[in-house]
Image (spheres, grey):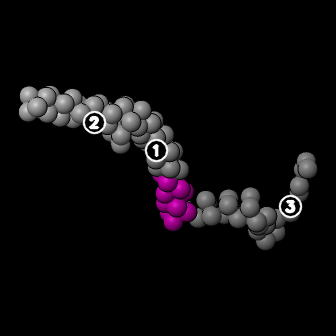
Amino acid sequence: MANRVVPAFLIALLLIIHAQLWFGRGSVGNVSAMQQKLEAQKAANLRAQQANERLASEVRDLREGIEMVEEKARMELGMVKPNEIFVSIGK
């Protein structure tokens, strides 16, 4: 009987390890899904980083130059300087 217990135990252990490989947390499918999520997150991080760099550049421009502030005020708020006439063409 002892001769059969060791091989049966080893086979059961092998089956458990094999099941973990295909169905457990570190399974082939799970690792593939995690890699896809990782790639998607890297792409999202890159887009966010580029947006942050654009915003940082705009902040730098706003801090350094009054022309940028004046342009923003003219475009977004319709600012007009004294002795200027505002003419809207189009819409």
Judge depth for marks 2 and 3 and give the one in front. Answer: 2
Amino acid of disc 3: Phe
**Mark 1 / mark 2, whichever is N-terminal:** 2
Please state the extent of the stretch shown in magenta in the rendering. 52-64
For mark 1, give the secondary structure: helix
Q: Please name whichever residue, 60 or 80, is drawn nearer the observer in this view of the structure.
A: 60
Judging by the rendered image, the residue that carries numbered circle 1 is 41
Amino acid of disc 1: Gln
Q: In this view, does 44 lie above or below 4?
A: below
Q: Does the magenta stretch include residue 85?
A: no
**Mark 2 / mark 3, whichever is N-terminal:** 2
Dot 2, how many residues are within 10 Å of its Cα: few (below 14), some (14-19), or many (20+)? Answer: few
Judging by the rendered image, the residue that carries numbered circle 3 is 86
Amino acid of disc 2: Ile
| Residue 16, numbered label | 2
For mark 3, give the secondary structure: loop
The residue under the point 91% across, 48% down is 90
Q: Please name whichever residue, 42 or 13, is drawn nearer the observer in this view of the structure.
A: 13
Rendering quarter of residue 25? top left
Q: In this view, does 71 lie above or below 13?
A: below
Q: Please name whichever residue, 79 or 21, is drawn nearer the observer in this view of the structure.
A: 21
The quarter of the rendered structure image containing the N terminus is top left
Question: Gap in Å between the C-alphas at discs 2 and 3?
Answer: 79 Å
Q: Do the residues labelled 3 and 1 touch (CB within 8 Å)?
A: no
**Residue 31 appears in the rendering:** no
Residue 9 location (% of width, % of height): 17, 34
Q: Main secondary structure of the magenta part?
A: helix
